């Protein structure tokens, strides 16, 4: 089987595979893209909400402290009120653990009381605080937030000052330990491992769940990373920003301002975690694509196999039938057009077998019948020609002279060898002239023309054939003479009506002609000498213009009451070339 | 086809939300004290661990080792813990001074000054593989004297009992003397390294009972607090100290760091180190919250009226 350049299987497989995978791929990719976009939008909204919430919590923590500080500026500084003020401060310290120390300044701006959790109290120091930033700030805006400072280089503190409604109520300056914000900050969880933290306006860390980062101060590389993150966040203008956090992890962050102290609350979530859902979705899509591709491959393989399998079977079948194996059956039961095609193939094989059988039979028949008769026998459509009827036929008889004497003297091999040469020579000519050979009788042969196959000019045709036969046998005879056998060859032709048809019985039948003309031809043949072709008057009348004829006068013939006129066809060896060729 | 794929996708295992296979951590709790005196602090520490997601028996095993007031047993117990082995040791109080130089990380909670003890070059710079909390706030000694003066009107003289071998003790003494000067108090310092010195100090004080005693809290004072307070009460001397345990044993009041908070905070160090942080990267923290405990029973026994300005500040009042 020749391998095709582009096998159907590959084409179908590729087409089916692509047909399934491409839509799947397009769908998967668009889903991934939209999923990513939606996730980013959702993430941005969520983180910004978280940032606002965190900022609110921090602001709440500071507002709580400010509210508590307000208690200490409700009473005016008048004589005899000192103890009340002190009591307020002690209760404040009891109530607000974040306050480390409190300084009360009276309406004139003089320090009246300083209470610390650790240091001894200072009463009525009278220090002029009028130029203190905290006092100035509180007086102008009621609440003043100081910068974040690192007490003793490590503890983050912030100064907070509030002023009373009336100037005489004075100002309270409190130092807040920002480590207490830790409780607030630590309680904020962003996603699974995200954090919140706070930077002041100069980028210093004010609060972070990892308190040691806050305590470490500004010089730390982590603090620098957070400042960079802050710059990115400011540059991204309210949207989520990407950067590295204190632990050098890649995070996305959102910010929200804490208006009071002018701080910025950050919420961050590791980028890997933030995009976990979309990554999971991507994995799912990928797996889906893979499953789909495998499924498509299997399906394409199956369908392509289904398609090309029968085609291969058909191809093989055609090859088998071509090789003459007509019994080969193509078994296809796909229920589609291919099955129909296979049925046709099988039918064709059967018909081919029948036709081959017929042609073989004809070939066999031809060995015994004249080809024309053999074919008529086989061809039922023309079988009617074989039916008995009367026809104007030309009957040709020929036989050898002196054969009986030869056969008595010669051995069987020699007899059969000579007959073999003789019949081969005659057979070739008879076949060429399409004469119907009705029977052999030893060395004699009877031939018919114009039955059963019609022949336009049977007499002329017959004479030509006889001339050629005579010539051919004469040539043989010269070699026989050389071997010492004296044998001659004569031919007789007669034309007339005869009954033609099959005679015989079931299993063996011959085609022959019955009538006077047959006897006449036979007798004329018997009358012919070696080398002679004798014809009756009917034949002579038809070929007279084509051949030179020698009237031999009438001859008495056995079985005929009257003498019959006989003609001889005069053909010399040198005239052979002038003979019109047999068709 | 699509249905099949969707089905396949739906059958995918959900993304793992729990942190991988739980690793069981093993830590050692090492102290020179007895189990009973540390119950509230140990509870606070364990609560802190629980808050950070450590559950004993599931992802955490704590090996407890108590030297039962025999400090010389501590190194042996530490060696035992190392042999187990544990991931780190939490050394409570004086035990931390006995196990310097172990190969595994140590988290300590000490009343001493870590710099004086040689554990750090500064609170921001812990040394070696040790870090933790200090409960010491030397300034508090002045605050305690101020409280005493407020409780006892006309106070002129205070006896201070302290162990000079306690790292940072000299700072506490210095601050006390400085604050005394400012408050106009005469300070008598009694060094008590051991029982003999303590007995000697009692003998001296019995001669001329001071109007008040301030005890500098450390392991030795903690161990002998009942004797000190019993002695003081028998001579009608109010005692003040830093840790609530003293008030529970009869001291008139204590003012100092809120130790439960600090012990709870220790869990943070444990967590960070178990998660791979280097002890040297974890700064030593000081107390941020303080508590005032008043024993009104002792005050009544001694016939002392606690002024409202002090009572108002009390976090705990023992009636």
Image (cartoon, rainbow, N blue to C red):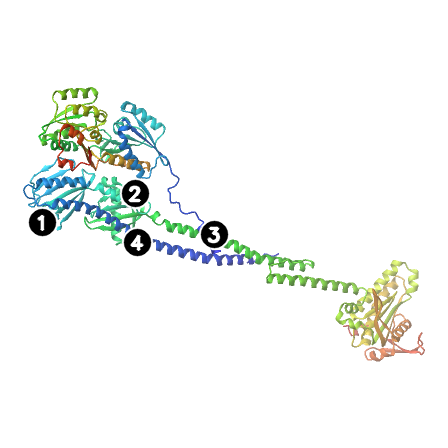
What's the CA distance linking mark 1 and mark 4?
44 Å
Q: Position of residue B226 (x, y in %)?
A: 21, 25
Q: Residues within 10 Å of mark 4 (few under 14, many from 20)?
A: some
What's the CA distance linking mark 1 and mark 2?
49 Å
| Residues tagged by mark 4 and mark 2 found on one chain of the structure | yes
Q: Chain of mark 2?
A: A
| Mark nearer the N terminus (3 vs 4) | 4
Q: Quadrant of the N terminus of chain A?
A: bottom right
What residue appears at the point 9 percent right and 39 percent down from the top-left corner? A83
User: Which one is closest to the eye, mark 4 or mark 2?
Assistant: 4
User: Which one is closest to the eye, mark 1 or mark 2?
Assistant: 1
| Residues tagged by mark 3 and mark 4 found on one chain of the structure | yes
Instruction: From the viewer's perspective, tell me whether residue B172 is left or right of residue B282.
Output: left
Q: Position of residue B151 (x, y in %)?
A: 12, 32
Circle on res. A45: 4
Q: Position of residue A271 (x, y in %)?
A: 33, 48
Task: Please give the residue where the numbered disc 3 appears in the rendered image.
Answer: A291
Q: Position of residue A8 (x, y in %)?
A: 56, 58
Q: Secondary structure at mark 1?
A: loop
Q: Residues within 10 Å of mark 1 (few under 14, many from 20)?
A: some
Task: Please give the residue where the numbered disc 1 appears in the rendered image.
Answer: A166
Task: Please name whichever residue, A327 or A475, is drawn nearer the observer in this view of the structure.
Answer: A327
Task: Please name whichever residue, B308 or A219, is drawn nearer the observer in this view of the structure.
Answer: B308
What's the CA distance linking mark 3 and mark 4?
35 Å
Circle on res. A247: 2
What's the CA distance linking mark 1 and mark 3?
77 Å
Dividing the picture into quarters, in which one does residue B128 lie?
top left
Q: Chain of mark 1?
A: A
Q: Residues within 10 Å of mark 2 (few under 14, many from 20)?
A: few
| Residues tagged by mark 2 and mark 3 found on one chain of the structure | yes
What's the CA distance linking mark 4 and mark 2?
24 Å
């Amino acid at each position: 089987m020749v391998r095709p350049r582009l096998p159907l299987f590959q084409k179908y497989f590729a087409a089916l595979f692509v047909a399934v995978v491409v839509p799947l791929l397009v769908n998967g990719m668009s889903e991934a893209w939209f999923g990513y976009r939606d996730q980013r939008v959702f993430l941005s909204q969520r983180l910004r909400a978280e940032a606002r919430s965190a900022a609110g919590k921090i602001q709440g923590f500071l507002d709580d402290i400010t509210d508590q500080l307000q208690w200490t500026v409700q009473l005016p500084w008048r004589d005899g009120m000192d103890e009340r003020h002190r009591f307020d401060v002690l209760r404040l310290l009891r109530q607000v653990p974040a306050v480390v120390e409190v300084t009360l300044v009276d309406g004139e701006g003089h320090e009246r009381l300083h209470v610390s959790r650790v240091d001894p109290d200072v009463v009525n120091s009278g220090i002029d605080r009028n130029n203190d930033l905290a006092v100035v700030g509180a007086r102008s805006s009621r609440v003043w937030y100081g910068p974040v400072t690192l007490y003793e280089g490590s503890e983050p503190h912030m100064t907070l000052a509030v002023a009373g409604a009336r100037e005489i109520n004075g100002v309270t300056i409190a130092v807040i330990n920002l480590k207490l914000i830790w409780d607030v900050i630590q309680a904020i969880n962003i996603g699974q491992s995200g954090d919140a933290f706070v930077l002041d306006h100069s980028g210093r860390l004010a609060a972070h769940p990892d308190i040691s980062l806050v305590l470490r101060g500004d010089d730390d590389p982590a603090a620098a990373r957070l400042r960079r993150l802050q710059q990115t966040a400011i540059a991204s203008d309210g949207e989520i920003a990407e950067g590295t956090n204190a632990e050098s992890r890649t995070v996305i962050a959102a910010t929200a301002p804490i208006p009071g102290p002018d701080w910025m609350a950050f919420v961050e979530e590791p980028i890997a975690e933030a995009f976990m859902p979309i990554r999971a979705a991507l994995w799912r899509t990928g797996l889906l694509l893979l499953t789909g591709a495998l499924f498509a491959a299997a399906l394409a393989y199956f369908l392509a196999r289904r398609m090309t399998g029968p085609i291969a079977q058909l191809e093989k079948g055609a090859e088998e039938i071509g090789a003459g194996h007509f019994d080969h059956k193509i078994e296809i039961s796909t229920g589609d057009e291919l099955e129909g095609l296979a049925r046709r193939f099988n039918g064709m094989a059967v018909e081919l077998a029948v036709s081959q059988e017929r042609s073989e039979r004809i070939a066999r028949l031809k060995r015994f019948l004249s080809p024309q008769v053999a074919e008529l026998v086989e061809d039922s459509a023309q079988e009617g020609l074989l039916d008995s009827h009367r026809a104007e036929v030309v009957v040709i008889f020929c036989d050898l002279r002196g054969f009986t004497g030869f056969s008595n003297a010669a051995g069987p091999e020699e007899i059969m060898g000579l007959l073999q040469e003789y019949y081969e020579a005659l057979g070739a000519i008879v076949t060429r002239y399409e004469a119907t050979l009705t029977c052999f009788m030893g060395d004699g042969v009877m031939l018919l023309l114009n039955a059963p196959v019609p022949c336009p000019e049977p007499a002329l045709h017959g004479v030509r054939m006889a001339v050629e036969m005579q010539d051919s046998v004469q040539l043989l005879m010269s070699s026989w003479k050389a071997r010492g056998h004296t044998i001659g060859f004569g031919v007789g032709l007669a034309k007339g009506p005869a009954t033609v048809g099959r005679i015989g019985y079931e299993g063996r039948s011959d085609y022959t002609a019955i009538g006077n003309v047959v006897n006449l031809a036979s007798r004329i043949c018997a009358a012919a000498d070696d080398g002679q072709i004798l014809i009756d008057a009917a034949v002579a009348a038809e070929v007279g213009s084509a051949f030179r004829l020698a009237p031999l006068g009438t001859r008495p013939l056995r079985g005929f009451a009257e003498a019959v006129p006989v003609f001889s066809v005069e053909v010399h060896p040198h005239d052979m070339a002038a003979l019109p060729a047999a068709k | 086809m699509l249905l099949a794929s969707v089905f396949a996708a739906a059958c995918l295992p959900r993304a793992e939300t729990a942190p991988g296979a739980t690793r069981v951590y093993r830590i050692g709790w090492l102290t020179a004290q007895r189990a009973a005196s540390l119950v509230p602090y140990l509870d606070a520490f364990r609560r802190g661990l629980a808050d950070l997601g450590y559950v004993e028996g599931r992802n955490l095993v704590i090996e407890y080792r108590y030297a039962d007031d025999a400090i010389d047993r501590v190194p042996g117990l530490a060696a035992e813990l190392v042999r187990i082995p544990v991931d780190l040791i939490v050394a409570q109080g004086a035990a931390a001074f006995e196990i310097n130089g172990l190969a595994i990380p140590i988290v300590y909670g000490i009343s001493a000054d870590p710099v004086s003890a040689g554990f750090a070059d500064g609170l921001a710079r812990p040394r070696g593989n040790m870090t933790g909390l200090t409960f010491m706030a030397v300034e508090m000694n002045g605050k305690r004297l101020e409280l005493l003066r407020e409780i006892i009107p006309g106070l002129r003289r205070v006896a201070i009992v302290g162990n000079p071998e306690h790292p940072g003790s000299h700072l506490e003494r210095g601050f006390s003397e400085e604050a005394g000067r400012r408050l106009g108090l005469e300070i008598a310092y009694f060094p008590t390294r051991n029982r003999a010195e303590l007995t000697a100090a009692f003998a001296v004080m019995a001669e001329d009972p001071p109007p008040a005693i301030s005890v500098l809290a450390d392991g030795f004072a903690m161990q002998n607090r009942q004797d000190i307070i019993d002695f003081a009460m028998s001579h009608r001397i109010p005692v003040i100290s830093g840790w609530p345990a003293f008030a529970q044993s009869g001291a008139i009041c204590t003012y100092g760091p809120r130790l439960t908070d600090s012990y709870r905070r220790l869990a943070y160090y444990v967590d960070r180190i178990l998660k791979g942080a280097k002890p040297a990267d974890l700064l030593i923290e000081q107390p941020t919250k303080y508590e005032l405990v008043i024993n009104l029973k002792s005050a009544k026994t001694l016939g002392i009226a606690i002024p409202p300005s002090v009572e108002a500040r009390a976090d705990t009042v023992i009636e």
